[in-house]
Image: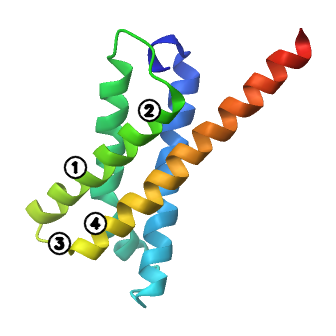
Amino acid sequence: MWASVRLSERYLWLVLDEAIVVLFVAIGRSRHHAGLSLAGMASTTWPFAVAVVVAGLVLWGRARAVSPWASGGFVAVVTVAVGMVLRVVSGQGTALAFIVVALAFNGALMIALRAVVGYVRKRARAQRH
């Protein structure tokens, strides 16, 4: 998918994936009564935000197209894996439950968003013909 996508659309996916990460962090921080201060949000978000960029760069460099399902799954796995490594390196915690929830939430939303966009595009193409 990424190799055949315009640059503007690649940036749009990057922004949407980053929004999913921010939503994940905001929900997690509020559920654990950690607050939504700018400093707290930034501290929790940055490892995952950097990981989304890493995943996007890898996908952008692919020579062949990747399906929306595969790209969403790939971005989710890289986001959580690289994000957790960066959390450890920066002295933040990682519990197994946190990893599972992060992968489930980000994976579900990143894949679902791509599936919905793919479905809408397919329907639009079918209606044009």
Q: Amino acid at mark 3?
A: Gln
Q: Which residue is mark 3?
A: 92
The residue wearing badge 1 is 82
Q: Position of residue 92 (x, y in %)?
A: 17, 72
The residue labelled by disc 2 is 71
Q: Is disc 2 placed on a helix, strand or loop?
A: helix
Dot 1 falls on a residue whose secondary structure is: helix
CA separation in Å, label 3 and label 1: 13 Å
Between 63 and 34, which is closer to the camera in this rendering?
A: 63
Q: Distance of mark 1 from mark 2, alpha carbons?
A: 16 Å
Name the colour scheme: rainbow
Regarding residue 68, the answer to whether it shows in the image is: yes
Q: Which residue is mark 4?
A: 99
**Sooner in the amino-acid sequence: mark 4 or mark 1:** 1
Q: What amino acid is found at the position of numbered circle 2 in the picture? A: Ser
How far apart are labels 3 and 2 at the CA level?
A: 28 Å
Q: Quadrant of residue 66?
A: top left
User: CB of mark 3 within 8 Å of CB of mark 4?
Assistant: no
Let me know if residue 43 appears in the view. Answer: no
**At 41% from the left edge and 41% from the top edge, which residue is drawn?**
73
Amino acid at the residue labelled 4: Ile
Residue lying at 38% horizontally and 47% vertically, measured from the top left:
76
> Which dot, 1 or 2, sits closer to the camera?
2
Q: Please rate how many residues cluster around mark 3, counting C-alpha atoms within 10 Å: few if below 14, some from 14 to 19, many from 20.
A: few
Where is the C terminus found, in terms of image quarters?
A: top right
Classify mark 2: residues with Cα within 10 Å, few (<14), some (14-19) or many (20+). many
Distance between the alpha carbons at the discs numbered 3 and 4: 13 Å
The mark lying in front, picked from 3 and 2, is 2
Q: Secondary structure at mark 4?
A: helix
Identify the residue at horizontal 52%, vertical 42% (top origin): 15
